[in-house]
Amino acid sequence: MSMKRRDFLKTAFLAGALTGLGLEPFSSLAAKGKRDTARKMIILGFDGLDPHLLEIFIRQGKLPAFARLWREGDFKRLGTSIPPQSPVAWSNFITGTDPGGHAIFDFIHRDPQHYLPTFSASKTEEAKKTISLGNLVLPLSGGEVTLLRRGKAFWQYLEEYDIPATVFKIPSNYPPAPTKQRTISGMGTPDILGTYGIFNFYTTTTAEVQQDIGGGRIHNVYVIGNQIEAKLPGPVNTFKKDRPETYIEFKVYLDPVNPVAKISLPGEEFILREGEWSGWKRVEFPLIPTQSVSGICMFYLKQVRPEFKLYVSPINIDPAKPALPLSTPESYSRELAAKFGPFFTKGLPADTSALDSDILDDREFLIQDDFVLEERRAIFEYELKRFESGLLFYYVSSTDQRQHMFWRLLDKNHPAYDERLAKEFGRAIEHIYIEVDRILDKAFSRVDKNTILMVMSDHGFSPFRYAFNLNTWLKENGYLSLINEWKQGEEDFFLNVDWHRTKAYAVGLNGLYINQKGREAEGIVPAKEKEALVREIARKLESFVDPATGERPVRRAFVTQDVYHGPYTQEAPEIILGYNQGYRVSWASPLGRIPKKIIEPNREKWSGDHCMDPAVIPGILLTNRPIQAKFPQLFDLTATILQTFGLPQPPEMRGKPIFKEESWAKPK
């Protein structure tokens, strides 16, 4: 059986275990830049907004604010990154370079010494100096969380000229790059366990306990006298030698007649009706007498009887008492928490894993994601109201998450299409476009003749109907060998790979590496033979045809030496695969499993994607100024920011401004 998406999520944050318990927090930073600027910029980042769908909804009259912006300014497709993954694409925008300049090539990179996947965006290290007292391990120095994205961020350039900026939830900025500007981290920010997000599900249904769930933990509980006792797991306690998992105990009291339950946490009790969400609840995990870790989570009482079912969301880092760095200055997250209460801090807030695992159904998932959207809208209106100078960037994730999960109900040719569900939820994607149109309408209220208003997305979207097992293709074409053929498909992390007979392997969602001698621990390909091998593999991948459809799954196989620029190109995979519409890498290949079939139907709810050829899924760009560039790219927008504020463009930036300077003050 191929690796499921939930297994991928469970292991993808291998380097991210919470070790911030002994961290030194960011030093207190002064206020952001205070210079009043004659020109201002408001940039709305709507992740994954697709130009084709956007045009359809505009022409149907469903997006009046987008229609206005197009009418008063311009609308063009925005060239995305290679590969078009969110951390890569947003890094292009942040730095004005391609991956050769910022060193983010995928969600997942690899350790060449162990062939294991590693998280690409950040690295967490424990305190290097400790002292042992019995079973206690006390840090004498702080641990460290390091941002692995290279290059300078555009708001850091603005800071050098005392131009203020507020940057809310931009991906690929965890931990936040040091700055005096207001920033809060987005995609890449872990939950309190240091993962992409682990939910907890408590049930009396034995069958559900047997499910193989990643991205979540299922707990079998028992009702005794209308009472349930359970534990909510927390982070590992690094203050103790045996590193036990922390937890808090809680109780659930069931009404003997009505579908109602009282949940008793340490220090708080609350009542939920069946089908009701709790809102945020703060939980404290004790470590040692003077130390604890605070997190926030939501409880959802899915069912009281005949079987009990209680969902607890991934435990987010508490923005009021962050155990890991969330913002610059560090007081910014506390400021927002004081005004709005707890809010989602996990980088991917909507629990797609719970939906894919059938713990939440479509309706419940959309309710949860509405909570995310409501928080985003409230904080946006707050920041918009106090925006007076410089730049405001605001990011929305729901556009991306809903297209990932509900594309199956738009596409009748998708293996997971369900006619009954399509009647009820088939407009979920349309609805999120309408919601962000309302956010754009709010932004117009702060736009004057000296303000550029820009709406962008990092990529578009495409159906994900078929999963391509890249490592299986490599095996079938003689580039990857197994130790035991009869165990094919049973092992993850390349445990069944014979490295002494393997020339190439794939890790991550789009990357392919050569098993190079002197670089990989068991490399066999001499450096002088590598380029010819790379070209050969790329050519064969592009010519491979799916016998079931007659289509080519790989539209382009990009040789990174040809398309990347900058000092980190040598760290990149040798080939980046650009998949054709309808195809994407499987969930098995990125983490080193080699299934028996090269192509399999994707029957999961994660049904739309963007890890394809960039030409297939461009993003969107709308502005209230005419766009000079015929084919604007993400890194052109970075150059445009500097141009807007009259700043010089550093030589490492690849982009060019999209506006003519003389047309800046001449909106249509």
Image: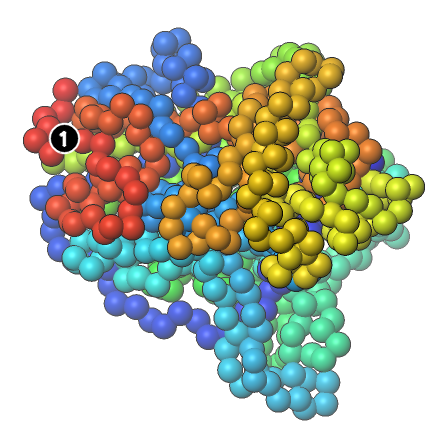
Q: In the figure, 312 relative to 235: above or below? A: above
Picture quarter with the C terminus: top left
Query: Residue at horizontal 36%, vertical 23%?
Result: 77
Residue 44 visible in rendering? yes
Residue 293 visible in rendering? no
Q: In the figure, 399 relative to 284: above or below? A: above
Amino acid type, callout 1: Lys
| Residue 181 spot, x, y in % from top left | 28, 57
User: In the figure, is residue 346 to the left or right of 524?
Assistant: left
| Residue 356 spot, x, y in % from top left | 69, 34
Q: In the figure, 334 relative to 97: above or below? A: below
User: In the figure, is residue 8 to the left or right of 616?
Assistant: right
Query: Residue at horizontal 47%, vertical 58%?
Result: 148
Total numbered labels: 1
Looking at this view, is 256 or 420 the one in front?
Answer: 420
Most extreme residue toward the right is: 486
Q: Residues within 10 Å of mark 1 (few under 14, many from 20)?
A: some
| Residue 114 spot, x, y in % from top left | 69, 60
Label 1: state its secondary structure: loop
Query: Residue at horizontal 63%, vertical 29%?
Result: 541
The residue tagged 1 is 660
Q: In the figure, 662 relative to 421: above or below? A: below
